[in-house]
Image: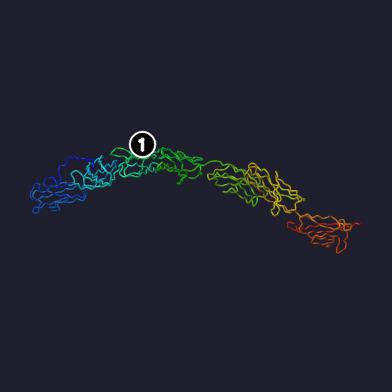
């Protein structure tokens, strides 16, 4: 059985029933004097005081709009435009009479349908156009409720059973035709009101927050707000809305919490949603750290996502209220935004806060430099990998002069092609980051310039400058000795910067030397000097005289030597006449063509090729003696 609450209308001033509206002088009657456009009026009686008027034999002139009589014996007329009109009837016998007609705009009577539990419903008419409103709750022609115009124009209805229904509302004015529009809405009953859900709270700017909600049609929602952890207060009724923007807030000064209340107007009960809160979010851009801080109600929060420059930077579990970002570059703009995640999937998105990273410091010096002298001086070093270095500044000093900037490099290696092999070049490596933070002055490294000398006994003396590129110095120097074909002959450790190679048994005419400096600190690469090549000259061995007199002692003149690969000799007398020649370095017995040559001084000349492939030519004097036996 349907049960409903009917609002009974008692209106004063209604003196006419249907068809009983009498003209000003009482001479005719009409069926209605007020209605919605299009509104049709009918003159029902023209002979209230007379008899036989307004007939074909005695016609009347009718003027329905007050513009002058235009028709004769016309009893119905339709008004299409809202307004106030004078309807007059001009009688032939007694003159004219009139009545005022009101035509109002035919507007939709807006209304809201509020769900109640137990298959009930409440209708609230929000329209203010009409004097009263006729409500049909059940898709039929029955008027289930009539309510007057007013701020409390409501009606309740109990369907008694679940189902889908059409609710119809139409407006009507007092003393007016019931011809105005009606408006309908389809309604589905509910046994209980579903719990509303707040999905996302987004900070649009410093004054506006936007809520995205999951709501149900026809439910009266009340949005509650709490400020900085204070008690909730009703902020606004919401109806048929899934999103709502809350204006005129101070998002940068406060945090705001919201809950949505599904209100049952029939039972005066509430069902509350989850709570979601904004963040009072600030970022302090300090030296060495971007300090993110925020305040909010931490209830229900499962994690906080931090976005940096529109990308997820980190997600922190739990409900933190602070984050320190130290991994950034100076002079770079950073924008941060928080997303607070709640259990159940709700999210709260903060304002975006931007600023420029600050980093001011003095970096540690480069304390170990390795140098290798080859085609120029090759420098290398190991910087701190945690420092974001923009460039290394290579400084150079020549012969103890001031350090001047030579070049910049972005790698930890540099080769100075203008290195002075005389040993007058020293280097310092400094660096800076993109914020122009600079390192302390680095160690000065002077690559080892190796020189060598050879004495007349083929002893080699090596000297080099002390290597200064290591923080804790050199633990030892190593002298490497190679053949001309780069085969290692030997390595000799020394503690000084001088080395003398006295090896008389060395059969290598050409030897190559280099110096290696080993650092005291572990893990630092050794530094290497330039290579020098020492080429020992051919040294001929020969007597100053010989005696080919048959006694077997010094019977011939022979030339021998070290590092000789091939040699020929020629001997000349004092007049320059060739007396002996051999391309195989054969001995001369003091004869020419089998004839003994006299005692005298003879000139010898030796020509040949040494073991290094170089030609040589030497000459001297040999005395030929023939002592008597």
Quarter location, residue 575: bottom right
Q: Residue furthest top?
A: 231
Which quadrant would residue 443 be assigned to in this image?
Answer: top right
The N terminus appears in which quarter of the rendering? top left
| Residue nearer the viewer, 153 or 15 | 153
Instruction: Give the side of residue 464 with respect to residue 69, left or right.
Output: right
Q: Quadrant of the C terminus?
A: bottom right
Q: Residues within 10 Å of mark 1 (few under 14, many from 20)?
A: some
Q: How are the residues colored?
A: rainbow
Residue 452 visible in the snapshot: yes
| Residue, far right | 629
- Taking the view exactly as shown, the residue that stands out farthest to the bottom is 593
Residue 102 visible in image: no
Which percent across, then down, holds residue 296? 42, 38
Q: Position of residue 21 (x, y in %)?
A: 14, 45
Q: Is residue 321 above or below residue 610?
A: above
The vertical placement of 289 against 78, above or below, is above
Q: How many marks?
A: 1
At which x and y percent is residue 156?
Answer: 25, 41
Local secondary structure at mark 1: loop
Q: Is residue 303 above or below residue 59?
A: above
14 sits to left or right of 114: left
Residue 253 appears at what percent x and percent y?
41, 38
Q: Nearer the viewer, residue 176 or 399?
A: 176
Whether 568 is drawn above or below 347: the answer is below
* Closer-to-camera residue (314/244): 314
Q: Which residue is mark 1?
A: 232
């Amino acid at each position: 059985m349907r049960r409903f609450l009917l609002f009974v209308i008692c209106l004063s001033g209604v003196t006419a029933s249907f068809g009983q509206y009498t003209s000003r002088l009482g001479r005719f009657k009409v069926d209605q004097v007020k209605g919605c456009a299009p509104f049709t009026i009918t003159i029902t009686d023209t002979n209230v005081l007379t008899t036989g008027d307004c007939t074909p034999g005695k016609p009347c002139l009718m003027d329905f709009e007050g513009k002058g009589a235009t028709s004769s014996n016309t009893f119905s007329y339709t008004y299409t435009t809202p307004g106030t009109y004078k309807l007059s009837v001009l009688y032939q016998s007694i003159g004219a009479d009139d009545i005022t007609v009101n035509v109002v705009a035919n507007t939709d009577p807006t209304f809201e349908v509020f769900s109640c539990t137990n298959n009930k419903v409440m209708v609230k008419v929000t329209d203010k156009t009409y004097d009263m409103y006729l409500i049909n709750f059940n898709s039929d022609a029955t008027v289930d409720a009539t309510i007057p115009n007013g701020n409390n124009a409501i009606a309740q209805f109990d369907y008694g059973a679940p189902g889908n229904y059409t609710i119809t509302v139409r407006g009507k004015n007092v003393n007016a035709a019931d011809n105005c529009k009606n408006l309908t809405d389809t309604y589905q009953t509910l046994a209980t009101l579903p719990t509303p859900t707040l999905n996302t709270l987004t900070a649009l700017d410093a004054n506006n927050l936007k809520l995205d909600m999951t709501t149900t049609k026809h439910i009266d929602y009340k949005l509650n707000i709490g400020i900085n952890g204070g008690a909730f207060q009703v902020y606004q009724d919401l109806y048929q809305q899934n999103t709502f923007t809350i204006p005129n807030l101070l998002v940068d000064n406060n945090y705001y919490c919201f809950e949505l209340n599904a209100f049952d107007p029939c039972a005066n009960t509430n069902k509350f949603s989850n709570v979601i809160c904004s963040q009072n979010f600030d970022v302090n851009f300090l030296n060495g750290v971007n300090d993110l801080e925020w305040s909010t109600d931490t209830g229900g929060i499962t994690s906080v996502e931090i976005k940096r420059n529109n990308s997820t930077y980190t997600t922190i579990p739990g409900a933190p209220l602070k984050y320190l970002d130290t991994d950034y570059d100076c002079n770079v703009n950073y924008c941060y935004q928080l997303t607070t995640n709640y259990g159940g999937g709700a999210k709260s998105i903060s304002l975006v806060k931007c600023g420029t990273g600050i980093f001011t410091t003095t970096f540690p010096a480069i304390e170990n430099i390795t140098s290798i002298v080859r085609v120029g001086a090759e420098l290398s070093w190991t910087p701190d990998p945690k420092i974001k270095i923009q460039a290394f500044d290579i400084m150079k000093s020549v012969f103890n002069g001031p350090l001047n900037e030579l070049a910049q490099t972005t790698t930890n290696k540099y080769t100075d092609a203008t290195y002075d092999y005389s040993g007058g070049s020293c280097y310092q490596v400094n660096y800076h980051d993109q914020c122009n933070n600079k390192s302390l002055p680095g160690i000065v490294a002077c690559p080892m310039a190796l020189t060598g000398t050879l004495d007349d006994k083929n002893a080699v003396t090596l000297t080099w400058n002390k290597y200064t590129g290591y923080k804790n110095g050199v633990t030892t120097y190593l002298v490497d000795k190679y053949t001309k074909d780069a085969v290692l002959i030997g390595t000799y450790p020394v503690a000084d910067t001088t080395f003398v190679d006295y090896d008389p048994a060395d059969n290598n005419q050409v030897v190559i030397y280099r110096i290696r400096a080993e650092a005291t600190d572990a893990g630092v690469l050794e530094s290497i000097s330039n290579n020098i090549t020492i080429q020992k000259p051919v040294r001929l061995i020969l007597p100053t005289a010989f005696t080919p007199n048959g006694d077997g002692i010094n019977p011939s003149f022979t030339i021998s030597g070290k590092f000789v690969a091939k040699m020929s000799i020629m001997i000349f007398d004092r007049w320059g006449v060739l007396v002996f020649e051999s391309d195989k370095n054969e001995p001369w017995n003091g004869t020419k063509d089998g004839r003994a040559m006299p005692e005298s001084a003879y000139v010898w000349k030796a020509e040949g090729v040494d073991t290094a492939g170089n030609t040589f030519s030497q000459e001297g004097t040999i005395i030929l003696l023939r002592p008597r036996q």
